[in-house]
Amino acid sequence: MKAGAPCIIAPQEGEVLSVLLNNAAYEGVATFTYGVDWKCAEAGDGFIFIDEEGETDFPAPSLHGHHQIINAALAVATLQCLPGFSFTYGNIIEGLKNTRWPARLQRITNGAIARSLPHKWEIWMDGAHNPAGAKVLADSIDMWGDVKVILINGRTKGRDIQGFLQPFIGKVHNILAVAVQSEPKSEDPDEIVSVAKQLGFDQASAFKNISEAVVYCCSNQEKDEKLVILLTGSLYLFVDVLQQKM
């Protein structure tokens, strides 16, 4: 925080919020706080932003996931605290609809792996690599409805595997652990499988790379049923999925 610059605060746990507000008071920083100065709520195909000026409807952001509603509303809140900048309601809508963030709950449609999938299957990528990111990602799985989700996980060695996989309990059909080819310090897939089985994931298998894991899926799942393959655990996986051949 810096004196003279406002601090826009997103939803926080009580203790965290107290620390932020106390620090702002100490530094003499003005705050624009969720739940006090502004709020938001999902509504239909978008969200409502609420502040002292009233309620304003906005379309859903182009980025997927429930958490992106909060992120979009936080961006709108920030705009309310930028005097001297000229923008219109239409500018905000254009920004929300055209935001791009590669490997953040992104559907992969290019590359040999994506092209090899059965017609009703989809492959998605998210760069979450810690327990907090995993929880947000797991909470977004319901966006696909009643569809079988298979998690492909590759990661950097030494990270918290248990904390990462735990949020997916009861939300994914099985876990396929892979070595991350683009990551010099990739975790051993067998170690990921070991932790997954300790957590109760009976269907967990290890593979050398994403291609092998996808081939396994194609051999062991119904090709005429809807299915989502979710890649996560490292941003390096994004490189792997675009570069690997089938």
Image: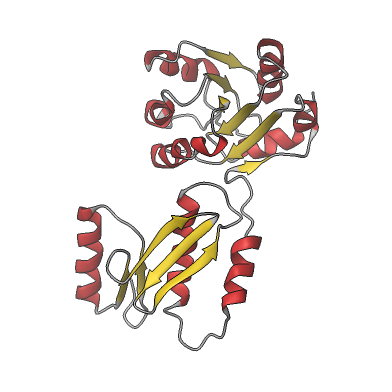
Q: Residue at 50% x, 36% y: name it.
A: 142
Give the farthest residue toward the front.
44
Q: Residue at 47% x, 17% y: name it.
A: 191
Q: Residue 203 in the image: state x and y as whole percent.
A: 51, 12
- Label total for image: 0
Considering depth in this image, is 174 or 191 the residue closer to the camera? 174
- Tell me the quadrant of the picture where the C terminus can be found: top right
Q: Quadrant of residue 107?
A: top right
Q: Residue at 33% x, 57% y: name it.
A: 11
Q: Is residue 75 left or right of residue 98?
A: left
Q: How is the image coloured?
A: secondary structure
Q: Is residue 9 above or below residue 161?
A: below
- Tell me the quadrant of the picture where the N terminus can be found: bottom left
Give the farthest residue toward the bottom.
84
Q: Is residue 211 above or below residue 114?
A: above
Q: Is residue 233 above or below residue 172?
A: below
Q: Quadrant of residue 8?
A: bottom left
Q: Residue 147 in the image: state x and y as whole percent.
A: 57, 27
Q: Residue 29 in the image: state x and y as whole percent.
A: 28, 77
